Amino acid sequence: DFHGIQCAVATLTTVRAYEKLFTTLPDKEKALAVVSAYDNEKWNAYLREKLGHGAESIIAGEEKERKYDKAKHAIRLEKIISEWNTLSDMVKQLPKADDLEAFMKDIGHPTEPGELGLTEEQWSEAFLMAKDIRDKYIGTRVLWDLGELEDAIASL
């Protein structure tokens, strides 16, 4: 499917993840534990397995950006926690996932990865890797910083 169609389904998925995430408070210890357990070499091997040669630009980007650096993560985590109410208010301004899904269905737009010909495994892998595709701080990075990315994927 067209990239825009894929992005719309991904947006719906992300809004669902945000809605679930912002029903609780951040768990700082969980987030720090996830980062502590992170193995960059293992992640790079996973990227190479899934993306082949295309993984090299992602890996090079991380070498430059250093988003997985534990000290940088701790700073981001403190900022997220200190701004939690503001972030929560921002998420509340997004269209509700149910409303977005109803609109998409009304116009005949796909709402689920299977409608794009993707398996649940493929969609989960894409959601997991999305945080590394570009040098942008996107929803999947917020989820990773909070130690919630794996849980969000499990609930897709």
Image (cartoon, rainbow, N blue to C red):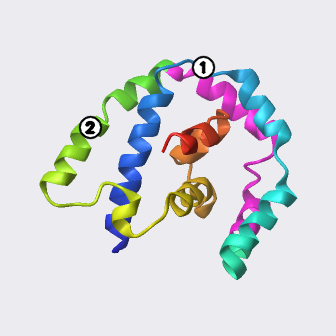
Q: Residue furthest bottom?
A: 53
Residue 142 picture quarter:
top right
Query: Looking at the image, which is closer to me, 51 or 134?
Result: 51
Amino acid type for the residue under numbered disc 1: Ser
User: Could one spot residue 95 in this view of the protein?
Assistant: no
Rendered image: mark on residue 82: 1
Q: Among all residues in the image, which is located at the extreme left?
A: 106
Q: x, y (%) of residue 96?
A: 28, 34
Q: Check the picture and name the quadrant holding the N terminus.
A: bottom left
Q: Is residue 143 left or right of residue 8?
A: right
Task: Name the residue carrying label 2.
Answer: 98
Residue 103: horizontal and vertical position, in percent? 17, 48
Tell me the magenta residue range: 58-84
**Residue 117 screen position, x and y as percent:** 40, 70
The CA span between labels 2 and 1 is 29 Å
Quick check: 108 above or below 21? below
* 89 magenta-colored: no
Q: Quadrant of residue 4?
A: bottom left
Label 1 CA crowd tier, 10 Å (few <14, some 14–19, many 20+): few
- Name the residue rendered at 33%, 74% in the picture: 2
Q: What residue sits 37% from the left and 67% below the top?
A: 116
Residue 76, image quadrant: top right
Q: Magenta includes 69?
A: yes
Relative horizontal placement of residue 84, taking residue 57 as reference (left or right): left
Question: Foreground mark, 2 or 1?
Answer: 2
Element under label 2? Answer: helix
